[in-house]
Image: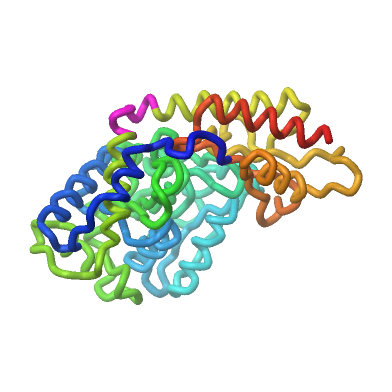
Amino acid sequence: MGPGPSNPYPEVTAALCRPMLGHLDPEFLALLDETCERLRLVFRTGNALTFPVSATGSGGMEAAFVNFVRPGDPVVIGVNGLFGARMCETARRLGAEVVTVEAPWGEPLDPEAVLAAHDSPAIIALVHAETSTGVRNEIGPIGNGKRDALLLVDMVTSLGGIDVDVDGWNVDVAYSGSQKCLGVPPGLAPITVGDRARQRLVERPSSWYFDLGLLSRYVDAREGRAYHHTAPVSMIYALHAGLGTLLEEGLESSWARHQSCGRLLQDGLVSMGMRLVAPVEHRLPQLTTVWVPDDLVPGCEEADVRRMLLDDFGIEIGAGVGPLAGKAWRIGCMGHTARRRNVTLLLAALGEVLSR
């Protein structure tokens, strides 16, 4: 959803307007180091290899898979939405033996089923906050029972918005995206890789660009700062500023703000007679899925409602995808948009549109 002040995070906007530096300039590299340290705090990890990949969240996913999946590897993947399915496609392209553990879209994965799917997987992968359904999957129980497998987790929609604890949950590899709860424009994919995972890096992955062995020599000063690619300097500025804003607020305070706004939105939708998709105990506060009402005015499609919200109120809500296409809406309330005034405006605008 998109209402609110035009410049909600002035620090991020100011960072994007900073004078350009070269990607090997010592001043920029010092800022990159500080950005990586801020990412460690937000991921809640001590992993040395923690940095922003120069790509969107899907690039973070590819970086995670190409560096650890070998042909023939048994890879267990939890699928209860679009992005779990995308993990499967990526792993199959790398020649993995993909073992899927599925749950209906809108329902959480069963951690015991994930752990029981294979007796000796090389990797267990799943999505923490499934953006396509608004469902939160449990990570801690899988990290505690994974045995020798690497645990690889998509945190694109969770980082900064709900509790994330990479080290506490025994996560070996995690990636995220800059544009969700971090409140930064899209274009970067923070990633963190633990020591167990670094020992199992593919020596020559199929992607040169996403080769973590090469990238680590650019982002880690202890490895000599070997040139790899031209980093998106202004985006690193923005991420540095966005992480600074988040850490100044405090992780727990950010989680509480998202929770409060999510509850306000979801309670408001229910009070309007609408039905939510995800079960309450696994419902994301920052991404709400709601069934399209059956009683839309004659001749009005769900896409018409979304168009009226955008045209008349400047509010954009997402369409359903996959099995939810045409049947559900996805309402984001994350990062700087997670404010009570935005929720109040959305509820009022939606009520006005639906009553036409």
Colouring rule applied to residues? rainbow
Question: In which quarter of the view is residue 25 placed?
Answer: bottom left
Which residue is rendered at x = 59% and y = 24% of the image? 264
Which residue is rendered at x = 54% and y = 27% of the image? 261
210 vs 331, nearest the viewer: 331
* Horizontal and vertical percent position of residue 184: 39, 46
Residue 262 in the image: above or below residue 20? above
Horizontal side of 191 relative to 321 (left or right) equals left
The quadrant of the rendering that contains the C terminus is top right
Which residue is rendered at x = 46% and y = 26% of the image? 257
**Residue 196 shows in the view:** yes
Q: Would you say residue 50 sits in the magenta stretch?
A: no
* Horizontal and vertical percent position of residue 152: 39, 53
* Horizontal and vertical percent position of residue 302: 77, 47
* Horizontal and vertical percent position of residue 221: 11, 57
Horizontal side of 82 relative to 142 (left or right) equals right
185 vs 165, nearest the viewer: 185
Question: In which quarter of the view is residue 24 placed?
Answer: bottom left
> Magenta region: which residues?
246-253
Q: Main secondary structure of the magenta part?
A: helix
